[in-house]
Amino acid sequence: MGDCELILTGAGASSRTALEAVGRTMAQAFPAYTVRLVCTTRTPGGELRQALDQAVQHKIRTLLLQPVLLTRGEEYDRIQAAAAPYAKYFSSLQIGAPLLDSAKGLEAVSEVLSSIAQSYDSNTAVCFLGHGSKTRPNTVYTSLQALLPKSCFLGVLSGRPNTADVLSQLRASPYRRVVLHPLLLSAGGHALRDMAGEMEAEAEALRFERAALLRDRISAIQALGKKQTVIAGLCADTDIWGLYRGSGKCCYAVLHMEEGNLAGRETELFTAPMEEEETEILSALTAQYYLPRAILPHEILLPVDRLFFEYPKAAVKAEFQKMLANGNRLPQHAFCIENAAEAAESEPAGLQAAGQILSCETLRVYMEEDFFGIYAWDARRKDYKPVKIFGRENPAGR
């Protein structure tokens, strides 16, 4: 085995056949390189990271990573983020651009699409539907459209121009027949569900699930954005984890830090049983994420409140939050305890629950949704005293 490797990555298991065809061509174009195919997934410890780990183990010095994608988007960003921490292990690590990222690529694709359109009669319009992106402008499709004959129409599944835009253009055109072609690496789930329209009833039913997914995605991003402060001196070769649990989905984020700078990030939505504790979720995630990897970061930083999960979670009532922000001692009735019955069972004998107010020896204290610190019961003074404060947010604005 040589010290040069070319990794071709495509999204989803359905891209395997298309990847193999691209791989055969790339093997001829790069005879000095070992070509490896990776169908990327959206699970922790996915195939791409495993392939990168193996490249390190095999002492590969020159690595080419080519995403087999048409445009830059979320999938391309995810591949870049996964590869960034590995750059220091190779003499050269280069990530290739998507096919439509250059004028040469646009011209080559336009010639292929034009030849497809020319195979139909003059009364037929040809509609090419790509993936697209809702997070960035789909200007590359506009550039491609300008290179195509008038009988060609371009649309995307995410963002604009969408199918409604294309249908509006088709209604205003003189064409009597329309042929739909997928503008994708492989015609898998998108062609079957989103394009052909044969599962329209199922798609209607899934809109509710998609709405819940988007709601949880927004909540997760907002939660993970709170108080994610990084101190440069503490973040040399460090992974920083954040975890959010919503009503329908969970989300984790991993920030890859190198010498205090953000080298890459990964986020993922997933489903977890409602009865599973956050600590159990985080433990399972980190194990799945790191066990397959040959190279580990120097430090792995987890959310600080997860270190004190054995203590009952207590929220401070609104009228006592100013006292909490100032680090004062608090009376017993200032707290509302989550899962009071379970907390009572875990505490020494003699501590009893009273509604949702509980006399526990130690509390994990939150101000609204933010972890504030650890408070302990003072039997002599009959109140709670601060043991360790991690946040000093003052809701009164003082």
Image (spheres, rainbow, N blue to C red):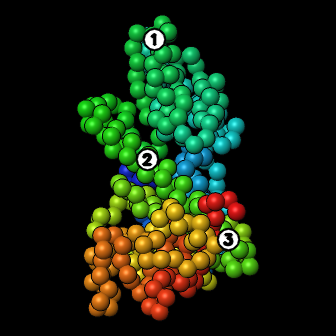
Query: Hey, what amino acid is under mark 3?
Result: Val
In the image, residue 173 lies at what x, y percent?
A: 50, 10
Locate residue 340 relative to residue 17 in the image: left or right. left
Q: Label 2: which residue?
A: 215
Q: Is residue 22 visible?
A: no
Residue drawn at the location 72% of the way across and 69% of the way down: 261
Q: Label 1: which residue?
A: 171
Please identify the quadrant where the N terminus is shown: bottom right
Q: Is residue 383 visible?
A: yes
Q: Earlier in the sequence, mark 3 or mark 2?
A: 2
Label 3 CA crowd tier, 10 Å (few <14, some 14–19, many 20+): some
Residue drawn at the location 52% of the way across and 63% of the way down: 319
Q: Label 3: which residue?
A: 230
Tell me the CA gap for discs 3 and 2: 27 Å
Q: Nearer the viewer, mark 1 or mark 3?
A: 3
Q: Quadrant of residue 99?
A: top right
Locate residue 296 relative to residue 119 in the image: left or right. right
Tell me the CA gap for discs 1 and 2: 35 Å
